[in-house]
Image (tube, coloured by chain):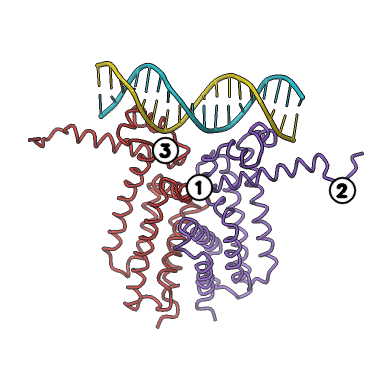
Chain colours: A purple, B red, C cyan, D yellow
Amino acid sequence: MTPSRQVPGRQERARQRREEIITAAGEMFARSGYRGTSLADVAARAGITEPGLLHHFGNKAGLLLAVIERRDLDSEAFALELLGMEPSGRLRALPEFARRNKQRAGLAKLFTVLVAESLEPGSPGHEHFVDRYRSMRAIVAENIRSAQAAGLARPDVDPMAKAIEILATLDGLQTQWLLDPEAVDIVATVESYARTLERDLTCGLP
Amino acid sequence: MTPSRQVPGRQERARQRREEIITAAGEMFARSGYRGTSLADVAARAGITEPGLLHHFGNKAGLLLAVIERRDLDSEAFALELLGMEPSGRLRALPEFARRNKQRAGLAKLFTVLVAESLEPGSPGHEHFVDRYRSMRAIVAENIRSAQAAGLARPDVDPMAKAIEILATLDGLQTQWLLDPEAVDIVATVESYARTLERDLTCGLP
DNA sequence: GTCTATACCGGGATAGAC
DNA sequence: GTCTATCCCGGTATAGAC
């Protein structure tokens, strides 16, 4: 029997160590990208040696996948939160999303940087991001469909085309903001876009 | 006196060589990013040795800047073309832009990849892309302003906010398309977005 | 202007002790 | 599970001949 105790056990300690390393790696990847970050960079920041690091993740790509996985848990939590809301209030939640992202700019940057590094088929994260976008598009499209069914959106918009467009805009706003935070107020522009979207979906509606 | 002749002179030959190298570098940067590409990769593709390559550009960052400069000439040509059109026809030119970009996917990818690698202040291309986005936003905003003055767009949209939003959407559509060309038809989605935009700018207009 | 040769560093990864 | 030591590769860049 392996008794569970108050004091962290061996496995628990290891898990914590892993989490610390993933956090360190995420910070470095956001700054310099996957390719621009060395295992030594991550190891130094996590207070471990390179072999110690590789013990947990096998190789550098394994570390990347762990970082991506962690980020996904975070964004999934947000998606669930959004889906738990009234359909009519989801648009209004967008600025709140932006506000939260602004607090954790590192996470936003991580996503933007890793997607760009994953454009090429065969790169370590490629499959993952392809799948992820497909499922995000499907979720948003389904939302639009239900809004249409409820009479909250014009029936003549193509849900998938609009879903692509919405994700595109949010991504693009984020990129411009990350590049030049002085010139682009992410919260204000997302707020403005939410109004655009509301107008767009309801324009000409009885 | 240095006579200009029919046969390419020494300087002309050198310029051509430079252009060939820049082309090769652009292709490699688009595929693997700046950081993921080695001078050896570029040299091999251009049919030259590494020292030969460095003779022309000094160092790797110099090569990057040359690639960026070339890409800019291309996009400036498009901007001028667009500005030469009737204001009312510019929206309809967007899909044509997308169609052209589709033919030269490498150039689109190059831009997307390099922007992401330039998010961090201090990276080789950072200043350049900050400036470039600022001027693109200014141009688009000015276009919106003149459309408003001509009664072609609702006067209550903030031109700069809308400019940010338009560039964001086009960038984001491009990213999704590059990541997953099977799932995202870039021409169709840009066409759809152009309609969105037209509706948005004129919705409720007398 | 392009080459060969080479310096020199930093990268990822492994072996094996503790 | 973490360390030290080490391997070996590939990276950028320079020196100097032609």
Residue beneath disc 2: A6
The percent coordinates of residue B64 (x first, y second) are: 38, 42
Residue beneath disc 1: A116
Q: Is residue D17 toward the left or the right of residue A94 in the image?
A: left
Q: Residue at x 28, y 59 (%)?
A: B81
Sequence-earlier tag: 2 or 1? 2
Classify 10 Å Cα crowding around label 3: few (below 14), some (14-19), many (20 and above): many
Q: Nearer the viewer, residue B44 or C7?
A: C7
Q: In the rendered image, which quarter contains the C terminus of chain B?
A: bottom left
Q: Is residue B201 toward the left or the right of residue B72 in the image?
A: right
Q: Residue at x 58, y 43 (%)?
A: A125
Q: Secondary structure at mark 2?
A: loop
Q: Nearer the viewer, residue A48 or B92?
A: A48
Q: Secondary structure at mark 1?
A: helix
Q: Residue at x 42, y 40 (%)?
A: B29
The percent coordinates of residue A189 (x first, y second) are: 50, 67
Q: Is residue B65 above or below residue C18?
A: below
Q: Residue at x 26, y 63 (%)?
A: B84
Q: Are marks 2 and 1 on the same chain?
A: yes
The percent coordinates of residue B36 (x first, y second) are: 48, 37
Classify 10 Å Cα crowding around label 2: few (below 14), some (14-19), many (20 and above): few
Residue beneath disc 3: B28
Q: Is residue A104 above or below residue B151?
A: above
Chain ID at mark 2: A
Residue found at the far bottom of this picture: B206
Q: Nearer the viewer, residue B187 or B154?
A: B154
The percent coordinates of residue B22 (x first, y second) are: 33, 39
Q: Secondary structure at mark 3?
A: helix
Of tags 2 and 3, which is closer to the observer? 2
Q: Nearer the viewer, residue A204 or A82?
A: A82
Type of amino acid at the residue the image marks with label 2: Gln
